[in-house]
Image (tube, grey):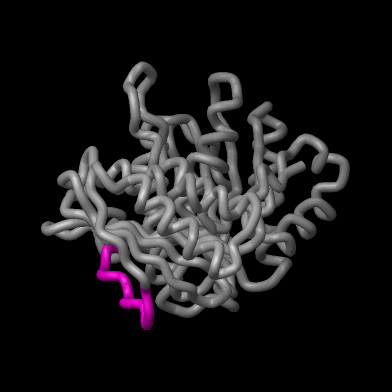
Amino acid sequence: MISPARNFSHPALFYRGAREYLEGTVPFVRDGLAAGEPVAVAAPPVGLDLLRTALGADAGAVRFIDMTTVGRNPGRIIPAVLRAFCDAQPPGPVRIIGEPIWPGRTALEYPACVQHEALINTAFAGRQVTILCPYDAAGLAPDVLDDAHATHPVVIEAGRERPSDRYAPDHAVASGNTPLPEPRDAASFAFDDQRLRDARRFAVRLAGGFGLTGTRLDDLALAVSELITNSVLHGGGSGTIRLWTENDQVVCEVRDGGRLSDPMAGRRLPPNGRPGGRGLLMVNHIADLVRVHAAPDGTAIRCYLGGAPVPAGAAD
């Protein structure tokens, strides 16, 4: 049984099949409800359905969130799912089940998922929050479970809870900061502070030609505006924007000479009263996926947008 956290707790639950999933999650939820703690479950639909059925009448006291929609972009999970739920609660302990990695996550998404899991430890340090992360040990590759040992200080398997002897969240964050694969064919546009409007028009025209329409084209225009403005303000005053298509998505990359040194950028709100600092946060909210490569000589931020808009909140 997982005890309520006096401060932050972040265990990984390795499960094999529905029975082990429920044995690890139902007591966690019911113990939290019995203690008067707010409880949320952010998981793929299969897990949500299992828990709703198993909890019976208790399910009405739980916030259920479809992680495959709201958490489609791993960079959005901390601000829009985990922090959004915690910050809406009164002071005191909070419990969340969060399953950001499931069979079917793509190789392109996966490094961002690992970084997300590692950064949870930074985002909630010192808070009275317990975030239990289930991992489908039967359906996920062994290296995914190895990474879970690196991003979680505690691992639960076959009913036994133990400290992870491979816990290394900083290494896990760094492992995802790798050069992004080069596209086969991309159109590019160099910009500076005098060509921001031209760069935005270039991106919108190309994305429209690639098939983005309506609100998704507006979303891309907003994301581009935020990224190119950041380049001018914080990335040396100029940059290059590139667009192409990949797996039925429009991909937009902005590259500049700045160094993005804070891995939490785009995952937390800036302090009250500080202007700016919300550009990458907005891009994370808009995009289906955001990948970042921060190198000593510059930063590349790549966002992926499909035709379907991001749901405002797939929860009940």
* Residue 188 screen position, x and y as percent: 32, 67
What residue do we see at 56% from left, 34% from top?
Answer: 84
* Residue 222 screen position, x and y as percent: 48, 45
* Residue 298 screen position, x and y as percent: 17, 57
Q: Quadrant of residue 112?
A: bottom left
Residue found farthest to the bottom = 184
Which image quadrant: the C terminus?
top right
What residue do we see at 60% from left, 48% from top?
Answer: 97
Check if residue 185 falls in the magenta segment: yes
What residue do we see at 80% from left, 43% from top?
Answer: 59
Q: Quadrant of residue 15?
A: bottom right
* Residue 41 screen position, x and y as percent: 66, 47
- In the rendered structure, which segment of residues is drawn in magenta? 177-186
95 vs 207: above or below? above
Residue found farthest to the right = 57
Any part of residue 292 in sight: no
Closest to the observer: 239 or 112?
239
Check if residue 305 falls in the magenta segment: no
Any part of residue 170 in sight: yes
What residue do we see at 55% from left, 73% from top?
Answer: 137
Q: Quadrant of residue 135?
A: bottom right
Instruction: Give the left or right position of residue 295, taking residue 215 as reference.
Output: left
